[in-house]
Image (cartoon, helix red, strand yellow):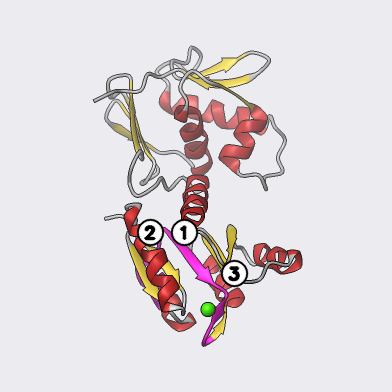
Amino acid sequence: MLPPVLIVEDDTKLARIVKAYLEGADFRTVHVSTVREALQKAEEESPLAVILDLGLPDGSGEELCQSLKEMGDFPVIMLTAKSSEEELLAGFALGADDYVTKPASPRELICRLKAVLKRYDRGSAGKETVDSFNNGALVLNGLRHQIAKDGRPVAVTPTEFKLMLTLASSPGRTFTRDELISRALGYQFEGYDRSIDAHIKNLRQKIETDPRAPEYLRTVYGVGYMFAGERDAL
Ligand code: CA
């Protein structure tokens, strides 16, 4: 079962609306209204993401955000009445992945949530998380972060997996190295763009039958890379 989205909000009316919208979009949810419960549930459930109200009765949402980010690798979206630039920047400094200013439209909240989940490669509610190519020869499982080649699991690093998932999201499309860095490694990555080449080389060793004549990960000279597999249709 997919982990839930943890809603931390002491305004029960607002929490009910957020919950209804998320469930309507096929997410599971768990709602808590205090810092104490939030920490407990985050520990127990290891959530898909956290939607966090900053004004909570038993502590600061900012501190909670920081604690949550130390607990696990899940995105946190702040729900905030604060809208001054300094306060929002402070929120990002504490590790928030995005924020929505109240009064917020639930639809906007869902869009933001899907966007951060995409950045984390968590997929949305278990959909489109498994992709199969070339008659099942290559299978990518976005939820488990696994690649299988000819039915055998291939051990890849998180960066290699993100890179693979990015390229395979659009078979036949050429990605520049800069695009791959921002999409697969995150915009905060300050690396030399040729570092992508090293990751591609490693991936080829792992998933190509002949790494020197790659079937999947093709070089587009002078531009970047493209994924050449054909997505299987059911
Ligand atoms: Ca509140």
In the visual, does 100 lie left or right of 38? Answer: right
Instruction: Please give the residue where the numbered disc 3 appears in the rendered image.
Output: 80
The span from disc 1 to disc 3 (Cα, nearest Å) is 13 Å
Name above or below for residue 174 compared with residue 145.
Answer: above
Residue at x 47%, y 54% (from the top left corner): 107
Residue 140 lies left or right of residue 105; in this view the side is: left
Of callouts 2 and 3, which one flags the residue occurring earlier in the amino acid sequence? 2
Residue 36 appearing in the image: yes
> In the image, residue 132 lies at what x, y percent?
32, 28
Amino acid type, callout 1: Pro
Q: Which of the image's four quarters has the C terminus?
A: top left
Q: Is residue 127 magenta?
A: no
Magenta residues? 40-58
Question: Would residue 53 be counted in the magenta stretch?
Answer: yes
Q: Is mark 1 within 8 Å of ligand 1?
A: no
Q: Height in image: 108 above or below 232?
A: below
For label 1, the residue is 106
Q: Are marks 1 and 2 in contact (CB under 8 Å)?
A: yes
Q: Can you give x and y, in whole percent of width and height, for residue 210 in the image?
A: 44, 15
Q: Residue furthest right?
A: 86
Dividing the picture into quadrants, the one containing residue 48 is: bottom left
Give the mark nearer the N terminus: 1 vs 2.
2
- Tell me the amino acid under the disc marked 2: Tyr
Which of the two marks, 1 or 3, is nearer to us in this view? 1
Q: Earlier in the sequence, mark 1 or mark 3?
A: 3
In the image, residue 226 above or below residue 14:
above
